[in-house]
Image: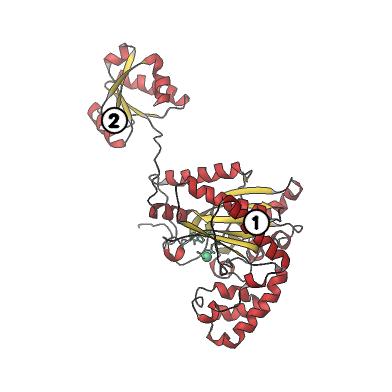
């Protein structure tokens, strides 16, 4: 019997993990610069958290969730995203009493039962953040700038920022009526999903992946043209804040985002490379979410970035990540006595934070030399009788074969410096 990883999942191998780690470190460093701290939330939640938090009418809840009954008869769902769990944690842990805004970032796996495609998996990874308690557009502009700084620090460009405002329940209510008037005469031509959305959430019809290219959808009235005065002012101020920081954006009235709880600002970072899965990062404001999950009315905003899509994009842009040399030096032993010396030396070096390796397979001296050449370790040193009795070692740089004599007394300092 040969096993393979479940459909839609993949192994991230030691040979590629450094790219993930680099991205994760960079993301967390940048979040810290902005005053965010990490939160770790459970991989699964009570199904209701997502039903209420993500929204009953979304594809995520209707089609994509991994939901099961546990042995205690509870309905459990593997998290399809991070926001609902973070909001649940914010409420449950009484974080509303902390100084506002409460700002948190995360690095999670997420699970959605989706059709496998490039950049679309059933288990995937997201960086994201959430900020609670700030209503004005300053924080919207600030979190957009976090994504921008992240892309720049990782060496990516050619990712465009699209922004839109989807208003508040007040302007959306009036707009939904306008949309219904628009779609009503054509409802028979729409897909089954859209026919359901027509009553429950006509806004979602604009986002439809099936009907999206039809003229009837393209010519629909645009919410951005029907915002209330407060939402309009919020949006205008957001744009001026972005202008002020020199962050370029495209206004895109078609972004409505897949999730129900968004209000006002919505944004996406879109690549020209990954094709239909070009949205690397999506986010927005969700002023109604905390309340709908049982907290007190609290404005919120956040984003999530698909790590797989980010790395695909980095690859497409030819960004090269340097693989760190965790192990700096290999010590080859010419005798059993040398082996004893090396194992003690390696222990001392590791206590000093210096990565080093010794033979662990009982290899012959020649085989150890061969291994050192193949393993990619940047330096090596041979320990024979001369080195055991003398007070220096020869450190060889594998790249060009140059040798440096280093006294045993200076070895730690020397290895720390290379
Ligand atoms: P899409 O329209 O591509 O399905 P979405 O609107 O469902 O995206 P969000 O829920 O906003 O996506 O999730 C934020 C980000 O997470 C996306 O922009 C994307 O980068 C990533 N993402 C979402 N679903 C998947 C998936 N199945 N596999 C890999 N990455 C994903
Ligand atoms: Mg989706």
Percent x, y of residue 225: 64, 72
Task: State the SS at label 1.
Answer: strand
Q: Which mark is residue 163?
A: none
In the rendered view, would you say 94 is above or below 329? below
Residue displayed at 34% across by 12% down = 391
For the C terminus, the image quarter is top left
According to the picture, the residue beneath numbered tag 1 turns out to be 301
Percent x, y of residue 93: 72, 49
Q: Quadrant of residue 141?
A: bottom right
Q: In screen coordinates, is 312 left or right of 106?
A: left
Separation of marks 1 and 2 at Cα, in angstroms: 51 Å
Residue displayed at 65% across by 62% down = 235
Residue displayed at 60% across by 54% down = 242
Queried on whether the Cβ of the residue with tag 1 lies below 8 angstroms from ligand 1, the answer reads no
Q: In screen coordinates, is 362 left or right of 208?
A: left
- Count the labels in the image: 2
Q: Is residue 286 visible?
A: no
According to the picture, the residue beneath numbered tag 2 turns out to be 398
Residue displayed at 42% across by 50% down = 12
Closer to the observer: label 1 or label 2?
1
Q: Is residue 12 visible?
A: yes
Q: Quadrant of residue 180?
A: bottom right
């Amino acid at each position: 019997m040969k096993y393979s990883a479940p459909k839609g999942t993949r192994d991230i191998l030691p040979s590629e993990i450094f790219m993930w780690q680099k991205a994760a470190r960079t993301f967390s460093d940048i979040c810290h610069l902005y005053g965010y701290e990490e939160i770790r939330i459970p991989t699964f939640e009570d199904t209701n958290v997502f039903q209420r938090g993500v929204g009953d009418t979304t594809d995520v809840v209707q089609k994509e969730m991994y939901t099961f009954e546990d042995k205690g008869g509870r309905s459990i769902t593997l998290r399809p995203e991070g926001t609902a769990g973070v909001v649940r944690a914010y409420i449950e842990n009484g974080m509303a009493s902390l100084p506002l805004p409460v700002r948190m970032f995360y690095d999670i796996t997420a699970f959605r039962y989706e059709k496998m495609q490039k950049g679309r998996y059933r288990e995937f990874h997201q960086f994201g953040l959430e900020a609670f308690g700030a209503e004005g557009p300053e924080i919207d502009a600030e979190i957009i700038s976090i994504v921008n700084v992240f892309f720049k620090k990782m060496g990516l460009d050619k990712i465009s920022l699209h922004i839109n405002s989807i208003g508040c329940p007040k302007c959306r209510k009036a707009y939904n009526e306008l949309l219904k008037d628009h779609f009503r005469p054509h409802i028979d031509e729409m897909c089954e999903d859209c026919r359901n959305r027509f009553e429950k959430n006509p806004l979602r019809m604009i986002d439809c992946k099936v009907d999206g290219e039809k003229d009837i959808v393209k010519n629909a009235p645009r919410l951005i043209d029907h915002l209330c005065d407060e939402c309009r002012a919020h949006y205008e101020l957001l744009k001026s804040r972005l202008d002020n920081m020199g962050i370029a954006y495209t206004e895109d009235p078609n972004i409505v985002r897949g999730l129900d709880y968004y209000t006002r600002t919505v944004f996406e970072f879109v690549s020209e490379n990954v094709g239909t899965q070009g949205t690397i990062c999506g986010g927005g404001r969700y002023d109604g979410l905390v309340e709908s999950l049982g907290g007190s009315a609290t404005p919120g905003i956040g984003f999530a970035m698909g790590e797989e899509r980010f790395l695909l994009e980095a690859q497409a842009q030819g960004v090269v990540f340097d693989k760190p040399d965790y192990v700096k030096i290999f010590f080859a032993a010419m005798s059993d006595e040398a082996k004893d010396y090396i194992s003690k030396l390696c222990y001392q070096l590791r206590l000093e934070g210096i990565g080093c390796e010794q033979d662990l397979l009982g290899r012959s001296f020649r085989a150890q030399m061969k291994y050192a050449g193949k393993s990619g370790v940047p330096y090596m040193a041979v320990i024979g009788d001369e080195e055991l009795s003398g007070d220096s070692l020869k450190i060889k740089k594998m790249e060009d074969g140059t040798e440096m004599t280093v006294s045993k007394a200076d070895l730690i300092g020397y290895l720390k410096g290379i």
